[in-house]
Amino acid sequence: MSKPHVLITGGAGFIGSHLADLFLARDYRVTAMDNLITGQLTNIEHLVGNPDFAFIKQDVTNFIHVAGPVDAILHFASPASPIDYLELPIQTLKVGSLGTHKALGLAKEKKAKFLLASTSEVYGDPLVHPQPETYWGNVNPVGDRGVYDEAKRFAEAMTLAYNRYHGVETRIVRIFNTYGPRMRLNDGRALPAFMCQALEGDAITVFGDGSQTRSFCYVSDLVEGIFRLLNSDELEPTNIGNPNEVTIKEFAEEIRDLCGSKSEVIYKDLPSDDPKVRQPDITKARRVLEWEPQVDRREGLTKTLDYFRKELEKLGRISV
């Protein structure tokens, strides 16, 4: 009997590459598809030569085809950090709309399960806290962040339309802040920025007064939740994240102390529509998937710090 085959769009990205590792470890065949606009081949270079792994360089907003049977498609292709989708607004909108349409079309053709990587950003700057899946959000559709928020909201609607109209078996995961090895050093999110600044001895830049909150989930916990969701019967969107909430100011100081750095923390103006709070309500994931995070923040940050230190050493930005 042949191994089940999954296609991961955005498979050379931070989360996509960790998903590839998980599925291969669980005896699946994996095809990763990525146009490398934000993904990196270094994330999957350790998989080269694995007979159960294949890579296709392709933009999923164009027609996509994969030979042979496909059992599941996990659609993770998209710029995912503010620095990316502010620089690539049209590409972000296209991958959320056209890319989702093409990936769903392939799922329909192959009679494959389809899992959409959505985001906590569909909740916008929330007026409900913590955020349950039943909350419809508070999104500015024409703000700078709207290109990402609305692309994902549209993708959710398209995914459920394919389920209702074409009978495609679909799942939707709403991903909250996730961190771990293989994050890009310059991706603009809080953790890479703080960690690089602390390790290089630069001032740590906090936007706003630092009172805004985030909830950080280690990547191994996230991909486990996604795997369980794919193999569940849950049709409606499901939050996956760590509900342990922390202010950005506290988070910056925590990373500085972990790095053994003497960097000062400085403050700059908060970008428009930046959410003031972010914390997942994971009641459904606990009930339906029997899932909750296992890695505490200190442990996860220590593993991530090892990765960042090695990457900065390779670039000659810090010395051993």
Image (cartoon, rainbow, N blue to C red):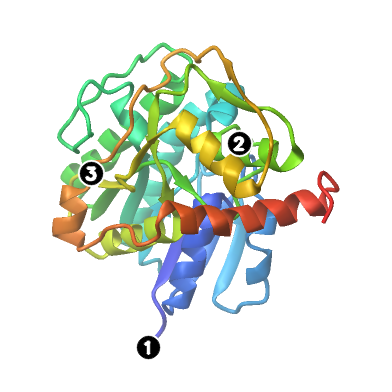
Residue 245 position, x and y percent, is: 34, 39
Distance CA(mark 3)–CA(mark 1): 32 Å
Above or below, comparing residue 232 to residue 318 in the picture: below
The amino acid marked with disc number 1 is Met
Which residue occupies 66% across, 69% down? 46
Distance CA(mark 3)–CA(mark 2): 31 Å
In what element is the residue under mark 3?
loop
Residue 217 position, x and y percent, is: 40, 49
Residue at the spot of label 3:
237
In what element is the residue under mark 1?
loop
| Quarter occupied by the N terminus | bottom left
In what element is the residue under mark 2?
helix
Residue at the spot of label 2:
194
Which residue occupies 59% across, 27% down? 83
Which residue occupies 82% across, 56% down? 320
Residue at the spot of label 1:
1
Label 3: how many Cα within 10 Å (few below 14, some 14–19, many 20+): many
Which residue occupies 58% across, 48% down? 258
**Disc with the residue nearer the chain's start (3 vs 2):** 2
Asked whether 304 or 37 is in front, the reply is 304
Task: Work out whether residue 207 can be spotted.
Answer: yes
Please tell me the numbered disc located at residue 211.
none
**Number of callouts:** 3
The amino acid marked with disc number 3 is Pro
